[in-house]
Amino acid sequence: MIRYRPKSAIREAGKVLGLTEDITARLSGTVWGSWSTGLPHKHIQQAGLDPNNPTILRAVNFACRMLGFPRHLSQHVGGFVLTRERLDELVPVQNAAMADRTFIEWDKDDIDALGLMKVDVLALGMLTCIRKAFELLAAHDGKKYGLADIPQEDPVVYGMLQKGDSLGVFQVESRAQMNMLPRLKPKEFYDLVIQVAIVRPGPIQGDMVHPYLRRRNGLEKVEFPSPSPEHGPSDELYQVLNRTKGVPLFQEQAMRLAMVAACFTDTEANQLRRAMATFRSDGKIHMFEDLLVGRMVARGYEKEFAERCFEQIKGFGSYGFPESHAASFAKLVYVSSWIKCWHPAVFACALLNSQPMGFYAPAQIVRDAQEHGVKVLPVDINHSFHDNTLERDEDGALMLRIGFRQVDGMPEAASNVITQHRGDGYADIEEVCRRSGTPAHVMRRLADADAFRSMKLDRREALWAVRRMPDDNPLPLFQINDAPERGQDVEMHLPTMPLREHVAADYQTLRLSLKAHPMEILRPVFRAEGIVTCAEAAARRDGAWTRNAGVVLIRQRPGNGNAIFITLEDETGVTNVVLWARTFERFRREVMSARIMLVEGRMQRSPEGVVHLMGARVYDRSQELLRLSEDHETRTQRSRADEFDHPIYQRDRAQHPRNVRVLPKSRDFH
């Protein structure tokens, strides 16, 4: 059952009350996460709206009343039910919207109540990425791999992970996971199992992370409390918690702890499991507190220890991993880490071809590949295919070639037609149109993406040449006479397109640029204000006051945690920013809307070498992006009379979202 959450409730209420989409977008944009309970007036004011406006006030009030109300039934994206006889004799089976897919009407709890076997299949994008990586390895190196064929316990792979070098790696690419890797220092496979499970709301809220790390590093003695001699053996908890240093990190351990230390029956343990079921909070976990604590105390355990055990178990009610689940994920962590470590070009190519997935946008994936020694080649009409591909340089090293799929709005069918008719290459733009029959609007997209460099045409020259080609719907006079619409070409000397405009257009059309980083172009502006680069910030001493600006890559707030994590990027690297909740509330509008963010605060360095900028003040410097593009503006090309059929009312240039939002949106997680 999917219920109304703040964003969906505000959108629905605003739609019913006649608010325009930009108003509802502003209102919903002030909400972070699905756990919010309302929309304070100060948040409405931060969105630039009047909280006393009667219509807005009614929309907000209705939205708050709708929170938690059933919205629609959802379907599990993958899974199957096993029965002894025909399934359709037990439950109605319907056709899904996707071809060759069916679904049943019953809820998962109904299936469980009847004792039917249900198996969920996780539709993991990383499985697709790994399969594509294996295919690339087979095609370019002649080596065929499967999940079981990867060399095990490779110390070089673990060395890479211990440094937090895990961008794009399954499950351990978030900022929290990257910060945990140098602290946990995984050396073997079971360490990865713990790594996957420990950075979760359950262990964090149950205060299990720091005790485990202290015990793992020898800073705290590993102890296993025991019951009174008449109630059981002294090592009963050793059997349950030995592998995790006496700290319950997995759901099975929490249940086993209840059964061993508090003598829960099978039925009571199953009820406990339901109460702390992943992704569901039915508010029943508190019902077991007196039962568990009381029985543990009665068996001779200290009350303080029993209460701490319950707090840890209660943490799993938010989100916790079963050990088997963590182990299967850890397998994919190791395999994806091995590919990234030994075949970075293959990993980056497979990762780009599996988008959308993960924490990072294509620009960061490409940049990470370059930092690992991979040469990246631009999209080109004579060399690219729809997918990103690999080529070899003169020394035999693999290079990554950007594919047509990175071009905004490029249809796969059009890409395939271009490559099928390419032969030994196209000589000029007219030949592309004549041999492949590529529509004019597709040619304009390719020109805007600077894909004609092999024809000695830069972006501006290609755009000029493409606009002289026949339109997709030629005028009747030329269509009847089968005559070209082009006149005699006149040699034009177009002004050179500045680098800053190339970078802006690259991000608008490809979501990345191989020419330069936007912050590199804007560096003189920020340098004049004494704002340091990410690399300079990372090199500063602990406690140093720092002003750092960069492109916002990720905003993350785990659950209703007291800290907000932001990743900024510039031409030198990244800065990990931490904002406490009170600071976030003070600068909510800037934090949630900035494309380029300036943060002031003090550097914090951990003993393991993890560096954070503890933000005290935040500024939105997105307006600096207007400096990148004064003349070039990428917009949808319209055919004749389209303005009449589909009116598009242009705003003032300074307010146009494509000018303000040159960069793609950050990826936000909560």
Image (cartoon, helix red, strand yellow):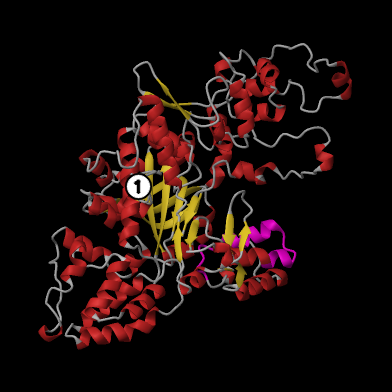
Report the magenta residues as a range: 13-36
Q: Amino acid at mark 1?
A: Leu
Task: List x then y, in percent, for residue 516.
Answer: 47, 31
Quadrant of the image occupied by residue 419:
top right
Is residue 166 visible to the viewer in this orientation of the structure?
Answer: yes
Q: Is residue 447 above or below residue 80?
A: above
Q: Which of 452 and 635 lies nearest the eye of the viewer?
A: 452
Quadrant of the image occupied by residue 42:
bottom right
Q: Indicate whether residue 212 is drawn in magenta.
A: no
- Looking at the image, the residue that sits furthest to the front is 85
Q: Is residue 6 above or below residue 424?
A: below
Task: List x then y, in percent, for residue 314.
Answer: 35, 74
Label 1 belongs to which residue? 332
Task: List x then y, in percent, for residue 512.
Answer: 50, 35
For mark 1, give the secondary structure.
helix
Q: Indicate whether residue 27 is drawn in magenta.
A: yes
In what quadrant of the picture does the N terminus appear?
A: bottom right
Residue found 58% across the figure and 44% down from its top: 661
